[in-house]
């Protein structure tokens, strides 16, 4: 891991681990890579931006193909408009790939899994799932104990097995919190 000091409003934090470990999807030895990087940007006293990237990968040792890989880039921007008004926006993309699973250490035959809704067994086939999440928050705090929070979140997915590519909205959420402190 490495961390830089913040200079000119910029800072970087990186963590990487690699080696050989068990891939629990196939219960076989694999080459693993886990990484996490964060770039901090503070151009002014009021604006903060954090960009993050996470990686997890499992590579078969026999033929060097990937059993699975997950990548998550994320950006969070916060702006303090005034002492009482605060805005936050977060965007995250989660892409997860899993190859067709097989008994890689012994027979090379497909691994079968149970489908919960039907109860039928079938081969664990290749999957690519993508999700994008965006969250926004408005905060107003005129005095300590008195706050107004307004938030919105939306999830978009590209489910496995759909014939046409592209993200589709699957979930929306709204958040309201009002708090007032009575002084006696």
Image: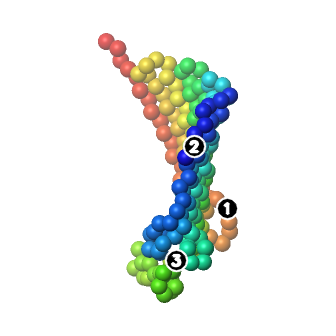
Between disc 3 and disc 2, whose residue precedes? Answer: 2
Residue 111 position in % (x across, y down): 47, 81
Residue 41 position in % (x across, y down): 64, 34
Point 61% across, 37% down: residue: 4
In this view, the mark in front (1 or 2)? 2
Characterize the local packing of mark 3: few (<14), some (14-19) or many (20 or more) Cα atoms within 10 angstroms: many
Residue on which the image places disc 3: 101
Residue on which the image places disc 1: 166
Residue 168 in view, yes or no: yes
Q: Secondary structure at mark 2?
A: strand
In the rendered view, would you say 30 is above or below 169?
A: below
- Decide which of 64, 69 is in the foreground and name it: 64
Q: CA distance from mark 1 to mark 2?
A: 36 Å
Q: State how the image is colored.
A: rainbow
The image quarter containing residue 158 is bottom right
Q: Secondary structure at mark 1?
A: loop
In the rendered view, would you say 183 is above or below 67?
A: above
Characterize the local packing of mark 1: few (<14), some (14-19) or many (20 or more) Cα atoms within 10 angstroms: few
Between disc 3 and disc 1, whose residue precedes? Answer: 3
Point 42% across, 78% down: residue: 114
The image quarter containing residue 67 is bottom right
Most extreme residue toward the left is 184
In the rendered view, would you say 125 is above or below 92?
A: below
Q: Which mark is residue 2?
A: 2
Between disc 1 and disc 2, whose residue precedes? Answer: 2
């Amino acid at each position: 891991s490495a961390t830089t000091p913040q200079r000119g409003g910029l800072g970087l934090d990186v963590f990487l681990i690699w080696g050989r470990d068990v891939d629990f999807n196939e219960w076989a030895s694999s080459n693993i890579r886990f990484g996490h990087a964060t770039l901090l940007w503070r151009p002014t006293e009021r604006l903060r931006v954090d960009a993050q990237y996470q990686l997890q990968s499992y590579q078969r040792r026999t033929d060097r193909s990937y059993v699975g890989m997950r990548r998550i880039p994320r950006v969070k921007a916060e702006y303090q408009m005034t002492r009482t008004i605060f805005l936050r926006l977060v965007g995250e993309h989660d892409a997860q790939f899993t190859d067709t699973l097989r008994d890689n250490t012994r027979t090379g035959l497909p691994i079968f899994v149970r489908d919960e809704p039907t109860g039928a067994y079938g081969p664990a086939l290749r999957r690519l799932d993508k999700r994008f999440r965006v969250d926004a928050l408005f905060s107003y705090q005129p005095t300590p104990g008195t706050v107004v929070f307004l938030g919105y979140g939306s999830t978009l997915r590209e489910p496995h097995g759909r014939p046409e590519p592209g993200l589709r909205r699957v979930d929306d959420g709204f958040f309201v919190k009002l708090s007032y402190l009575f002084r006696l």
